[in-house]
Image: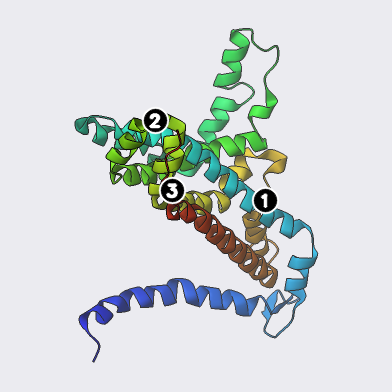
Amino acid sequence: MPDSRQILALPVVLLLLVGAILPLTILVVISFWSVDFDAFELVPGFGLASWREILGNPTYPYLIGKAVLTGGVTTSLTALAGYPLALSLLRLPKRWKSVALVVLLTPLYTGEIVRIYAWRLVLGTDGLVNSLLMGLHLVDAPLKFLLFSPFTTALALFYDELPFMTLALWIALERLDMRLVEAARDLGARPLPAFIRVTLPLTSTGLCAGALAVFALSAGDMQTPNFLGGPSGATALASIDNFFGTAFDWPTASALALTLLLTLIVAAALLAAGILRLGGRPARVAR
């Protein structure tokens, strides 16, 4: 007879089956089907045409690699900025920490589309930044690279995902015994070596949690590159959306979605493994 823990786990198991396993199974099955474009209907069967298209056409590996690169770059940038920000929040008086938390999460209070159009107003040819630069006579013409470029996409993703990384690091730092850091400083370690040898390994789990969240959200973002990236804004998710919608090529869409999913899972697993290895090293102090 099942015990109470097994009974309590049943809703979670059912949710996983219905919300994750079943949709993935359907994608796997459809990826081997074909499409009768004359009758505009799916044809059940077993074929590898969709997989040959995804793996043989260099466009799709490029888009998948671009998603991994986007996730990796955004994760790295948010980690570099997140640690100083989290350390600053850690040193705030207790009564100000709740205020800081509200301010930190402010970017998340508005929808993604609202934030995207705000960036267009700020970075556009007639936007705030260009108007200010021209008003100060620092440039003679508007800087066009500020909008509809990879720079814009990277900046917007960094802004959107920084709260997730900072919050994860903040929680990890709150649990850190600061006496260990103070001991490292007393033994002669400078701030940077003390951070690398002590703080970073002991907060690696928080860094891992933040990195996985940022990587998944940035690598899987379709709207930001689409609206801010210009000619460079093509993504694998946009292709999947087009195949499922306008093109009515569900087998190719399923094959591309599964390939993207597997690639991101492997990349995220390697990222997590690399970060968690930091915590397995002894905290050594370098003078």
- Quarter of the C terminus within the rendering: top left
What's under tag 3, amino acid-wise? Leu
Seen at 61% across and 21% down, the residue is: 126
Precedes in sequence: disc 2 or disc 1:
1
Q: Position of residue 255 (x, y in %)?
A: 66, 70
The three-letter code of the residue at mark 1 reads Lys
Spatial separation of the CA atoms under disc 3 and disc 2 = 26 Å
- Residue 94 in the image: state x and y as whole percent: 21, 33
Residue 284 point in image, percent of width and height? 42, 44
Residue that badge 1 annotates:
66
Instruction: Identify which residue, 116 or 266, lies in the foreground.
Output: 266
| Residue 150, image quadrant | top right
Q: Which residue: 64% across, 49% down?
A: 69
Mark with earlier residue (3, 2): 2
User: Residue 241: which quarter of the image?
Assistant: bottom right
Residue situated in front as seen by the camera: 4 or 117? 4
**Which residue is disc 2 drawn over?**
188
3D distance between C-alphas at marks 2 and 1: 43 Å
